[in-house]
Amino acid sequence: MPFLQDIIHKLEVGGGLRVIRIVATLLTIAFLGVGYNWRAFRNMASQEAMDAAQVARNLAQGKGYTTLFIRPFSIYLVKKRNEKKLSVLPPERAKDLAQLKGMHPDLANPPVYPVVLAGAMKVLPFRYAINLNQPFVQHQPDFLITLFNQVLFLAIVVLTFLLARHLFDASVAWLSGGLLLGSELFWRFSVSGLSTMLLILVFMGLVWCLVFFEHEAREPKWGTAGVIVLAGLVGVLVGVGALTRYAFGWLILPVVAFLILSCNRQRVLVVLISLVTFSAVLAPWVARNYSLSGMPFGTAGFSVMESTVIFPEYRLERSLEPDFSHLYLMPFWIKLMTNARQIVQSELPKLGGSWITAFFLVGLMVGFLNPAVRRLRYFVLGCVAVLVIVQSLGRTQLSEDSPEINSENLLVLLAPLLLIYGVSLFYLLLDQVILPFPQLRYIIIGGFSLLVCLPMIFVFLPPKPRPVVYPPYYPPAIQTIASWLKEKELTMSDVPWAMAWYGQRQSVWLTLKCTPDAKDPSTHEDFFAINDYQKPINLLYLTPQTMDARFLSQWVRAGEQSWGSFVLETLRNKKVPEYFPLNQTQNGWLPEQIMLTDWRRFPKSP
């Protein structure tokens, strides 16, 4: 009996309560992780995730920073750049100006996430081959990448908890960490395969450095050297974030404003150090891109032109000879205004996947006594203003295909900070309420948490979604098709990112046209411009991405040279047009998919 009393005393007075909290937290994390993956895990659904994963695999396999997903626009940039350097190119490069006969350099992805992912691929037991003799449930590498991102998510939760406890108190910290852990939006990002989790982790590291800098500038402990080191580290982290997602680099503007606001001495030196370290991190990669393509950020630097009236949808990335002669300011202004209106009306109010953003907005009128809390709030507001503009101008068709879960969703980076401020205001309001009995306080906190986490609760309710993202991706079919080709042979597809990731074959994105334009033979935007002059295409693979396209706008109005006309002619005549060099097909693919090869590479039976 005394022994039992000692245990109860330790639990109530000693560190036992802390142990219970830790154990309960770990059990909750395990339940959420296992339960969410069982209920909601799906194979990769976005081209960005597959693109980054296949680049990472090339790195892990010692093939350099190259890609199997080839954009026609990348061919244009590489060829144009090599033509300017023709006199200094080695003979083998001079014969392959587009760099298609070997590994094509990647010009779309910043390097940090693929490099980190390549490290994970070196350590974890990735198995890329699918056992075609068993029913397909999930692609093992997709699941391992999900687990890797969920580990990053847990690190974000821990940093958020510690930051909330540093700025406010333990109550705000526990509720902030719990609500972030229960955010269904973040779990969706974790299973998407995107670089968002890594980028938020970098951003939280940046916030911690800014908090330390503000404290050191206000109450010096390490002297001038401490301020200089922290300013340099801030610049490095912004640079690392920019090399994870280029648009992140624009946060150097609110960062510099925060440094100026927080530092009373040596402001010029501090700002210069942060800018120099930021530039030093970016410089080698910018030089690499410029050497390969003549552009500092490769194809990604043209995102501001995409989804405008000049280059709608994916037109620019699928262009072999883009026309930049008719650029003018108005389309960019229209893009900015249209997208900014949508962000302010739809995305800002539900930032972080819940309505707790409203608490942050109301909290702007609260005068916090802690200067660090006030200054960090100004920094968050500056980030919101900058990211709304950057996200509006950088928005492409990727955001239309997947409105929330995409790499262009930059505002989600601020969700942990907004959550902390929202929770702090909730507690501030709760402390002002006179409750009839103390236990009601816990009921109110529980009800508040339940409302915020409702989207996560719905995940565990029926119906359960299919684990395979079809249409248009069915990994066994893609691997089957890819197995008919040799490693260095070229394919063309409307989902080349999937062919690159699941099939491990070089795949060029479907060109704008199928056949040459009879009215303007000087243009080269068709299949034959690659097949006849760059590298033979051995296989064509079209999925519901094309077969389910809009009939009028994407098939009929696209003209006689379009892929829609090619599909219609093939379906109407029940055979491939005579002018097309890939005329071998296997029964069983139509009408959902079209698969054509240069010779009969497949077994007779489907």
Image: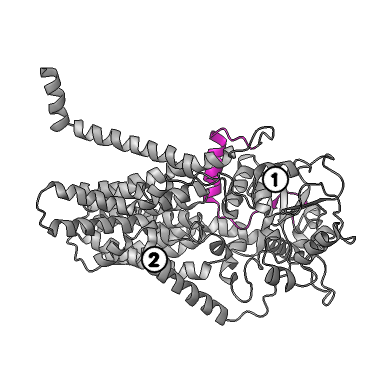
Camera-nearest residue between 90 and 76: 76
Q: Which residues are magenta?
A: 99-128
* Badge 2 density bin: few <14, some 14–19, many ≥20, Cα 10 Å: some
Question: Residue 8 placed where, x, y %?
Answer: 14, 26
Real-space Cα distance between discs 2 and 1? Answer: 38 Å
Q: Is residue 506 left or right of residue 117?
A: right
Question: Residue 479 placed where, x, y %?
Answer: 70, 42
**Per the image, is 116 magenta?**
yes
Q: Residue at x 19, y 66 (%)?
A: 367
Image quadrant assignment for residue 9: top left
**Per the image, is 273 magenta?**
no
Amino acid carrying mark 2 in the image: Leu
Q: Is residue 504 visible?
A: no
Q: Residue at x 72, y 49 (%)?
A: 506
Q: Is residue 522 above or below residue 580?
A: below
Q: Residue at x 73, y 41 (%)?
A: 480
Question: Residue 360 placed where, x, y %?
Answer: 29, 63
Judging by the rendered image, the residue that carries numbered circle 1 is 478
- The residue at the far front in this view is 462
Amino acid carrying mark 1 in the image: Ile
Q: Is residue 196 visible?
A: yes
Q: Which mark is residue 507?
A: none
Q: Is residue 8 left or right of residue 473?
A: left
* Badge 1 density bin: few <14, some 14–19, many ≥20, Cα 10 Å: some
Image quadrant assignment for residue 290: bottom right
Question: Residue 119 placed where, x, y %?
Answer: 54, 40
Judging by the rendered image, the residue that carries numbered circle 2 is 348
Q: Is residue 312 left or right of residue 185?
A: right
Camera-nearest residue between 163 and 567: 567
Quadrant containing the C terminus is: top right
